[in-house]
Image (tube, grey):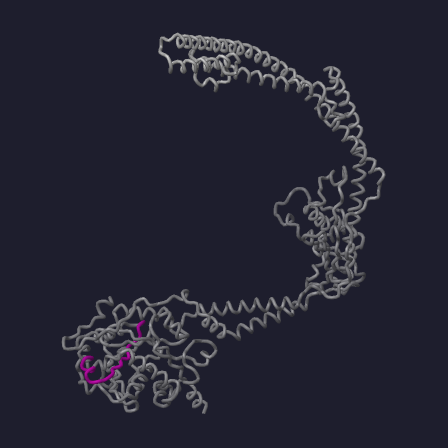
Amino acid sequence: MNDKNIYSPVIPSNVPQVVNVPYEAGGYVSEEEQFDLRRYWAVIRRHLWGILGLAVSVSVLTLLILLSKTPIYRATASLVIEPKQQKVVSVEELYGIDTKSAAYYYTQVEVLKSRAIARKVIEALNLTAHPEFVGESPAPDSAEETGPVGPDGPRIPKDLASADSGEPVDGGEAESSLLDWRSWLPFGTSQPVTTSTEEPDPVDRVVDQFLARLNVTAIRNTQIVQVSFEAASPELAMRVANAVCDAYIDANLEARTEGTQLASRWLASRLEGLRQKLAESERRLQAYLENQKLVDIGNASSSGGTSSGVSSLSASQLSDLNAKYIEARKARLEAETAYGQIAGLGGQVPDNIESMPAIYGDETVRDLKQQEHEALTRVNELSSRYGAQHPERVTAETHLESVRTALKKQIASVAARLKQQIAVAYANENALAGQIDGLKNELQGIARKESVYRELQREVQSNRELYEMFFKRLKETSEAGDLQPSNARIMDAAILPRVPVKPNKKLGVTIAFFLSLMAGIGLAFLLDFMDKSFRSSGEVEQKLGLPLLGLVPLVPQKQKRGVKEDVSRVFLEDPRGNFAESVRTIRTGIMLSALDDPRMSILVTSSLPGEGKSSISMSLAYALAQLNSRVLVVEADLRRPNLAKRCGLSAKMPGLSNLVVQTATLEECIHHYDAGNIDLMPAGIIPPNPLELLSSHRFAEAMAELESEYDAIILDAPPMQPVSDALALSRLVRSVIYVIQAEKTPVHMARSGIDRLRKVRAPLTGVVLSQLNLEKSRRGYSSYYYSDYYYGSYKQEGAQ
């Protein structure tokens, strides 16, 4: 059935319209968006005893397990590994080891943990016969040590000792036949399985156990290495730690002695070859000098590789020729420049001849220029006194022309001389360039010979130095002999440990306690996460998006003759108790939400039956009646009515259904309940179609008539999940109260019911959280705002 079609009853025109209270749709706040430390603390408080019980139990169990373990002692010795000073050819160089690098120290750590060192210690201390290493005994912290106590403290496994002599029993042969999987195959192989008849090395059997107990640690930024060994016997731990250091030092000395002997043999074999190679290189050098006829070409053997003689003389000549060539080229360029200036005059004499050194530098030109100046001065003087035809003036002018003609001839003579100088300069420059080229070729030939000579000379020098180095090293090695110092020494020998290191009871119990504590807290939060009910006012408002009108405490129900007593009567019997105070708080919230509406019509519903909806309806009616209001409680649950039975009325009395179908009058359907000074309209006869009856035109008219007669009407509606009656009723009231039961009503059901009411735009006023357990709330169940101030009287009276 479609809700949209049945939730809209037909309201006649004479019925006053209900004004819907505004609401905000989708007002939910997801749990992920909230971070409330008080809520987390409440979860921990609620499961506090369980968390502590788990932590204490695990801690006690851990302590018992640790007490059953065999105590393990650790002894530690300290070694100082120093780098060896390098010599010309050292043993380390033969193996490519740099004793000053970090890799060298890590290598020594691995050497200390090697099987070779372990074998030396095992053989030296005869650990194959020690009780801790007999057979395949478990690790030091194993709990299977059930045999007799050995001389050093640890227990010997029973299966490793015979009843008579206590000697190890080798059960490997018996186990081999049982564990051979090939014997179980149906087809098998044609060849019989052969087992080795060789006895296993007892040392190899113990090495793995030994290395599991050994710990070698290099201290950073130092040359110190700590060697630790763990054993059930403190004396054994001390002896083994010191023995490992001694074995390492001995092994190091043996390796150095063997290296020295190997170096001596290798140096001796190499020295003869180096001697022959040196002689051969000296013969090749002398032969080259003789073939090339070089006498003093380098003298590098005595002058440190610098060249002199022919090479330096040729270089000096080349330097002089380069200087002369530069001078010749400069003279030619100067002559060409001067000749170019004269040629540019075109046979004329310039006025600024004094600024031309190439011309004015000629003495004759200077004299003629002086004469020209004097003749010009004479002509100018005579011109001012005589006319153009005067004999003296004519003679002076003739003399001036002759001087100028002589000056031009002299300039031409200077130009011819410069041209000749240019030709001579060219010839000189070419001659010098030829000499330079020849000398360069000669120097290149000498340089090639010198390069070959230097190469041969370097080979001789290198072979001589190498020969001398090997000879010196061989002599040192022969003199040193077996006196090879070790690069390791014991800084602190291991001492007898007094306190076991395993098991660490304090640390183990502490870790177990905190881990189990965290596990308990995590389990508590897991249980809290799986609990999808409401436990606090904050959760109600957060998850439903509606205000919380109040909280109703849980009231224990008494039974009389198999029938539970009406909880709402607690309001009348104990008006100062918790229950009554909570109902009055709800009444105040409803009245404050409808200040502008003098008449109240309230619908009370819930998600499921048994959540306290009817008790709250009756209690709320009692509270409103105390304000001298005319209150009517309508039992709108036409499917499972129970209000009449609670109030002592007969179920056959006329009520709501009779009024709607008009089989009884309004006066006949309303019954006064003296105990609470309220009127009650029971359900009446149970109709076959309650939803259609509540959605009818007649029911809407009846509601309008009742609102005109009463100050407050409370409709006790059916739950939301089973049926849809409350949706139809919500359109005819001014306020809807949604009841949820603490710690029982699922969140998704409450949300579903409220969403359905919101879809029909029901006037949702708020939520009531019912049946709250006050004792649990004190242990952190909720953050309710009720305190002992409000609940004190109820507790005291209940105790009395």
> Is residue 718 within the magenta segment?
yes
Measured as percent of width and height from the top left, residue 758 is found at: 28, 69
Q: Is residue 171 visible?
A: no
Measured as percent of width and height from the top left, residue 563 is found at: 36, 86
* 564 and 249: which is toward the camera: 249
Magenta-highlighted residues: 703-721
* 617 and 462: which is toward the camera: 462
Measured as percent of width and height from the top left, residue 268 is found at: 81, 32
Q: Is residue 483 above or below residue 57?
A: above
> Is residue 386 within the magenta segment?
no
Left or right position of 756 against 778: left
Viewport quadrant of the N terminus = bottom left
Q: Residue furthest front?
A: 385
* 247 and 724: which is toward the camera: 247
Measured as percent of width and height from the top left, residue 448 is found at: 66, 19
Q: Is residue 416 above or below residue 171?
A: above
Residue 577 lies in quadrant: bottom left
Viewport quadrant of the C terminus = bottom left
Q: Residue furthest left?
A: 13
Q: Is residue 405 visible?
A: yes
Q: Is residue 142 above or below residue 288?
A: below
Q: How many marks?
A: 0
* 130 and 798: which is toward the camera: 798
Left or right position of 661 against 496: left
Left or right position of 622 against 296: left
Residue 101 lies in quadrant: top right
